[in-house]
Image: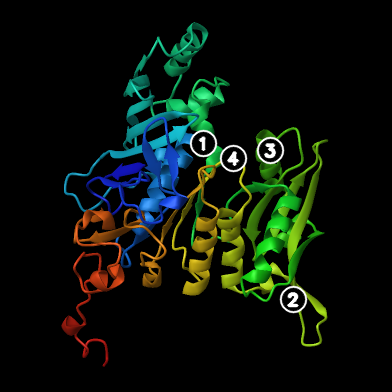
Amino acid sequence: NFTVKNWRSIKDEASITMQATREQQHGERLTKSNKFGFRILPNAIVFGPNASGKSNFVKAIEFLKDFVIFWDERFLNRNLTPNKLEIEQEDASSEFTIEMLLDGFIYEYYICCSSKEVREERLSKSNTSSEYMLFHRINQDFEFNESQISADDLYRLKVISQGTDRTRPLLNNAHEQKLDTFDTVYNWFKYSLQIIHPTSIFSRLSIFTSDEIVNLYNAWLPHLDTGIVRVEIEETTADKIGLSEENISEISDILFKAAPDKGVSASLGSKGDFGLVKIQPDGTTEIFRLITIHLNNNGDEVRFKMSEESDGTKRVLELIPAFCRDRGVSKTFIIDEIDRSLHSGLTKSLFQSFHSRCNEDNQDQIVATSHDLQLMTQSLFRRDEMWFFERDHRSSTLTSFADFIDTKKDKDIRKSYLDGRMGGLPNLRFDQIDLDACGG
């Protein structure tokens, strides 16, 4: 679950929950938490017109992740963007709350910050009978739960908190000081939460082994009408995929920290190519790029660089790891404008593939935004999986389709939405345009 307040176009609280309602439709793909007695949705899709708030909601989640993982002294000043349409917004605070079910416990992380400082920060942990505050911070005053933290860790936390900058999350500093007390939550932000933007070519740093990514693509691409028979990787140099030696060094450091005991590789887009930066167990670096194989009219194989592929094909390659990957560590994918450069049928197929793999053992989740109303159907999504943003002149609001009593499982939700019965439609006033002023 995620809630944000006073962020960009979002003035009041906007919240999305992945906890299922009592609706029974498509119940076979839900994960049940027997311990807590609720069911968990595998996906959510958020609709809405242009400038309604969809991308700002995604940016809020990304801001929180980056704040926890990539903090520096100027982070808040550069990146915090409260709603600008309120009169009294000087030094305003934005608020972020996220809940995670990890290792049989529900963790809630809350942070309130201005462009100058963290004003409040809190981490709590819940089981079926109790909720425990692990730490609570008001400005630079820190409180810790002595009954939930070992004496040694408590002593270190008190020292670390005294040295925590007023612009810095304690969650970040504790990890950087090699204290693992809160690493269950920190590692979820770092390794399990992944953001995919509409204009990015591949994730900022998606970590696979080279065999994993090639095998995954070769299992799915021939069935997705891309014209690709298979993919291969070939060795290359940094400059040929648009990376500097400094880029490679930085990526190598991140990958070595992520998996120091084995070679790993990062997929990244640069100059339209898909590069693999592979770290060998001895610390040396190898660089590869992805090549696609097509057949010409004689049936002969023709090799293509990724820069020669269409935007749609590149988008499919970016999305396949989210929708079709073999299950490992559970991940949550946040995908902005999932329909960008994709045909409706292909987007539906990706979701259908994901749904077919959802079961009690699958903890992966996908939250996507979309303009494609062909996806707004109960044959594909439950009502509690569909949301929409709408915006007035001051703020964006987020609403669940499950909030509308008359949206029964046999109802054409798309028709009701287009008829304006739910809101969330663009307010277009072409009749008020002065055509003479436009030269018409």
Residue type at tag 2: His
Residue type at tag 3: Asp
Residue carrying label 3: 253
Ranked by sequence position, the earlier of labels 3 and 4 is: 3
Disc nearest the viewer among 1 and 3: 1
Disc nearest the viewer among 3 and 4: 4
Quote the CA–CA distance across marks 1 and 3. 20 Å
The residue lying furthest to the top in this view is: 151
Q: In this view of the protein, can residue 404 be seen by the observer?
A: yes
Quote the CA–CA distance across marks 4 and 1. 10 Å
User: For the point 77% across and 83% down, which residue is it?
Assistant: 296
Residue type at tag 4: Val
- The front one of 293 and 437 is 293
Residue 64 on image: x %, y % = 42, 40
Residue 1 on image: x %, y % = 36, 42
Disc nearest the viewer among 4 and 1: 4
How packed mark 3 is, by other alpha carbons closer than 10 Å (few <14, some 14-19, many 20 or more), is few
How packed mark 4 is, by other alpha carbons closer than 10 Å (few <14, some 14-19, many 20 or more), is few
- The front one of 407 and 410 is 410
Disc nearest the viewer among 3 and 2: 2
Q: Say left or right for 102 vs 133.
A: right
Residue 4 on image: x %, y % = 31, 44
Q: Circle 4 — which element?
A: loop
Residue type at tag 1: Trp
| Residue 49, image quadrant | bottom left
Residue carrying label 2: 294
Ranked by sequence position, the earlier of labels 1 and 3 is: 1
User: For the point 80% across and 83% down, which residue is it?
Assistant: 299
| Residue 31, image quadrant | top left
Residue carrying label 1: 188
User: For the point 83% across and 81% down, which residue is it?
Assistant: 300
